Amino acid sequence: MPDLQILYEDNHLLIVNKPAGMLVQGDSTGDTPLSELVERYLIDKYDKPGRAFVGVTHRIDRPTSGAVLFAKTSKALARLNAMFQRREIHKVYHAVVCGAFPQKAGEAKNLLYRNRKQNKSYVVTEPHAEAKRAWLTYERLSVGDRYSLLAVTLHTGRHHQIRTQLSHMGYPIKGDLKYGAPRSNKDGGISLHARILSFEHPVTHEHVEVVAPYPEDDAIWSLLSHTK
């Protein structure tokens, strides 16, 4: 079993730093998802007979890395689900984009249409029955010779939202061939990382904030995080 990078754990919650290329939850591919690895970890650590409770509270795209929050109890799962619906759990992504990003900070508001057959979203300018409003804000953290590092905060949760909106602005995420990057990353993932999760604990009501370390197998993160 691959080693899990645990960012936070108590009796109710578990936060894991997901590697790029891994599913959060099982799908038709049959590939082992992160949720199954988490269950094995809990069974082994606590010597549980049978199965362990693993509540999937949210997902990030398979090629994306970073913090994923799981519930270890049904009570925590129900409360976290409600918190996600009320947008009380705050997520900040870091993205390496192609090119020199010109703005220090700003926002993007678009209408996104999801093409399910292509598993891809598009910005649309004409009225569309299935289009949904998408809103994010961004801050430029650094600029290198070929890439820039952005911090992105989602205010809506649309399919491939960050990937679609940044590509529409002319700055696709490094490695994201589907949305216009010129070449793939070595690991097949994309340089989008769920960096920060912060929220009020659903049971203890204490403030929880985790920062997921950057992927170690891609030097661009270290390079850009030290460039201004």
Image (cartoon, rainbow, N blue to C red):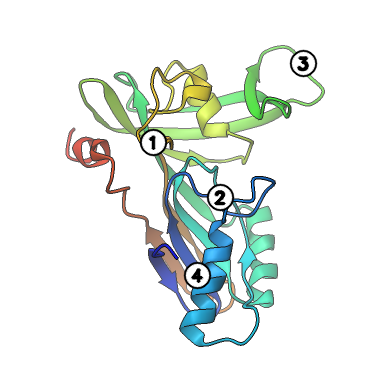
Earlier sequence position, callout 2 versus callout 4: 4
Earlier sequence position, callout 4 versus callout 3: 4
- Per the image, the residue denoted by label 1 is 191
Up-down relation of residue 106 to residue 225 (above or below): above
Q: How many angstroms separate mark 1 from mark 3 (CA)?
A: 32 Å
Crowdedness near tag 4: few (<14), some (14–19) or many (≥20) residues, C-alpha within 10 Å: some
Between circles 2 and 1, the one closer to the viewer is 2
Q: Amino acid at mark 3?
A: Pro
Q: Residue furthest top?
A: 126
The residue depicted at 47 percent of the width and 44 percent of the height is 21
Q: How many angstroms separate mark 2 from mark 1 (CA)?
A: 16 Å
Q: How many angstroms separate mark 2 from mark 4 (CA)?
A: 17 Å
Horizontal side of residue 179 vs 101, given as left or right:
right
- Per the image, the residue denoted by label 2 is 23
Label at residue 164 = none
- Per the image, the residue denoted by label 3 is 127
Q: How many angstroms separate mark 3 from mark 2 (CA)?
A: 33 Å
Q: How many angstroms separate mark 4 from mark 3 (CA)?
A: 41 Å
Crowdedness near tag 3: few (<14), some (14–19) or many (≥20) residues, C-alpha within 10 Å: few
Q: Amino acid at mark 4?
A: Leu
- Per the image, the residue denoted by label 4 is 14
Up-down relation of residue 173 to residue 60 (above or below): above
Crowdedness near tag 1: few (<14), some (14–19) or many (≥20) residues, C-alpha within 10 Å: many
Q: Secondary structure at mark 2?
A: loop
| Image quadrant assignment for residue 211 | bottom left
